Image: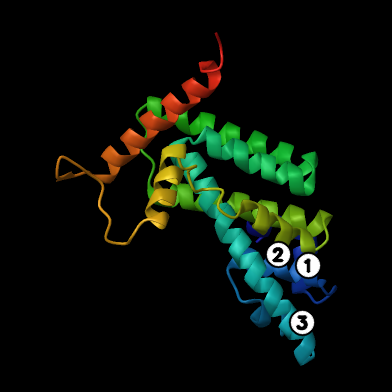
Amino acid sequence: MANVTYLAQGYISRVENSETVPNDDTLMIFAIALDLHYEEVFRQVKSYTTEEMLGILEQEVIDKKLFMKVCSIYYQVLKSGDTELLTKYVNCLANVTGLDIQRGVKIRLERSQNQISEDIRNGHEFKEDYFNDISRCEATRLFYSLSRSYAINYRRLLLQALDGLEEPEKPESESALKGIIELSDDSYLFSIHGKQLSQKEMYSIIEHHLTARKIEEMYGGRG
């Protein structure tokens, strides 16, 4: 249990022996780590009013979304070695929580990345479960740190900051093409000499046009 929740074994023993009553943050850590519903865990400790439980369930939606989002980011970073995603992720952490958590996360992920790369070079093959398990462990560790050191609203802020982080940035040509299509009739087709162009060909033409326009803006006014 201690390895899964990151709570001290002595504390867990006191809880199991009814020697202490965990607070709400600790109950949330138990629920996240063990993949249980908040209500299932909270109801075992004490009675809650309907209003109190509604607040707890609202927080569960935020926490579960954050947990799955972080798991997904860790999975991509570890499996594909996506250093760009890692950089964007740790920058988000720093912006929301400061540097304390960010440093630890960055060090652990880079260490894991290096170990995985070395093992792959030595011929070791990893199963999907390996990346899933390590991603869940690191996401649980992050949730533990957030619950212990920060007010509950920081989890909402971090979830908002991470929204769309995994989506690749669209090239300028794609944005331009989208704008052209939105201004045109739905039935409009891009074509040259009667031959309909593929989306890739359209992007290439628009990218060429944008590049030429930038060059003209840079040098057109010079004598």
Tell which residue pokes out farthest to the left in this image.
Answer: 194
Q: Is residue 66 left or right of residue 51?
A: left
Residue drawn at point x = 49 percent, y = 25 percent: 214
Question: Which quadrant holds the C terminus?
Answer: top right
> Which of pointers 3 and 1 lies earlier in the amino acid sequence?
1
- Identify the mark at residue 29; answer none if there is no mark: 2
Q: Is residue 134 visible?
A: no
Amino acid type indicated by mark 3: Val
Q: Where is residue 98 in the image (x, y as percent from the top left)?
A: 80, 43
Marks 3 and 2 close (CB-CB < 8 Å)? no
Q: Where is residue 23 in the image (x, y as percent from the top left)?
A: 82, 71
> Which of pointers 3 and 2 lies earlier in the amino acid sequence?
2
Q: Where is residue 186 in the image (x, y as percent from the top left)?
A: 32, 62
Q: Where is residue 189 in the image (x, y as percent from the top left)?
A: 25, 52
Give SS at disc 2: helix
Amino acid type indicated by mark 1: Asp
Tell which residue pokes out farthest to the top in this image.
Answer: 223
- The nearer-to-camera label among 3 and 2 is 2
Q: Mark 1 points at which residue?
A: 25
Q: How far apart are marks 2 and 1 (CA)?
A: 6 Å
Q: Distance between the residues labelled 3 and 2?
A: 14 Å
Marks 2 and 1 close (CB-CB < 8 Å)? yes
In the image shown, does 194 or 7 lie closer to the viewer? Answer: 194
Residue 173 falls in which quadrant of the image?
Answer: top left
In the image shown, does 194 or 165 lie closer to the viewer? Answer: 194
Q: Name the residue under label 3.
A: 45
Give SS at disc 1: helix
Q: Is residue 13 visible?
A: yes
Give SS at disc 3: loop
Residue drawn at point x = 63 percent, y = 57 percent: 4
Amino acid type indicated by mark 2: Ile
Q: Distance between the residues labelled 3 and 1?
A: 13 Å
